[in-house]
Image (spheres, helix red, strand yellow):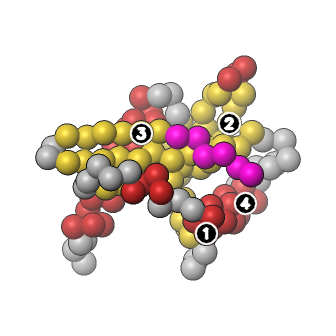
Amino acid sequence: MSLTKKQELGKWGEDEATHFLINKNYSIIARNYSLAKKGEIDIVAWHTKNKNQKTLCFVEVKTRSNQDASAERSVGKKKMSALFLVAKHYCLKNNIDIDNTYIQFEQVSIYKTNNKVDMRHYEIPVF
């Protein structure tokens, strides 16, 4: 089955985000981790943060073909709730001690217009 243009753009964006994170010394351990009907995490990676803290990062990738900042606005409370649920499942399935592991939620927003690519990387604050 062939992908739609939107799916092709999304897959391309996830591939680009993966390379972007690898270049920032992230160690990718999973891509497109999903929990049936609950949600999906685009990228799971380990990264050493401040003070040599090995941190498990759950990364949401949003790719757009315009520059309207809609990628940043697309991750709201509902999406974050789903990300938390899937991340918790990932940790339980992979024997990761969530009480003693630094965990960070992040977003890579990618804007591709006229063959120009703009990538923005954010840490998502957890309230």
Q: Determine which residue is flagged by label 1.
A: 78
Look at 72% across and 55% down and name the residue there.
Answer: 91
**Residue 51 locus on image (x, y percent):** 72, 20
**Amino acid on which the number 2 mark rests in the picture:** Thr
Q: Residues within 10 Å of mark 3 (few under 14, many from 20)?
A: few
For this view, does 64 lie left or right of residue 57? left
C-beta proximity under 8 Å, tags 4 and 2: no
Give the quarter of the figure containing the N terminus: bottom left
Q: CA distance from mark 1 to mark 3?
A: 22 Å
Q: CA distance from mark 2 to mark 1?
A: 24 Å
Farthest residue in the right direction? Answer: 99
Q: Sequence order check: which comes first, mark 2 or mark 1?
A: 2
Residue 119 in view (yes/no):
yes
**Residue 62 locus on image (x, y percent):** 41, 55
The total of numbered circles placed on residues is 4
Q: Nearer the viewer, mark 1 or mark 4?
A: 1
Q: Determine which residue is flagged by label 3.
A: 120
Report the disc number at residue 88: 4
Element on which disc 2 rests: strand
Look at 20% across and 48% down and name the residue there.
Answer: 113
When the figure is inspected, residue 96 is found, relative to residue 122, above or below; the finding is below
Q: Determine which residue is flagged by label 2.
A: 55
**Residue 105 locus on image (x, y percent):** 62, 47
Q: Residues within 10 Å of mark 4 (few under 14, many from 20)?
A: some
For this view, does 86 lie left or right of residue 109? right
Magenta segment range?
Answer: 122-127
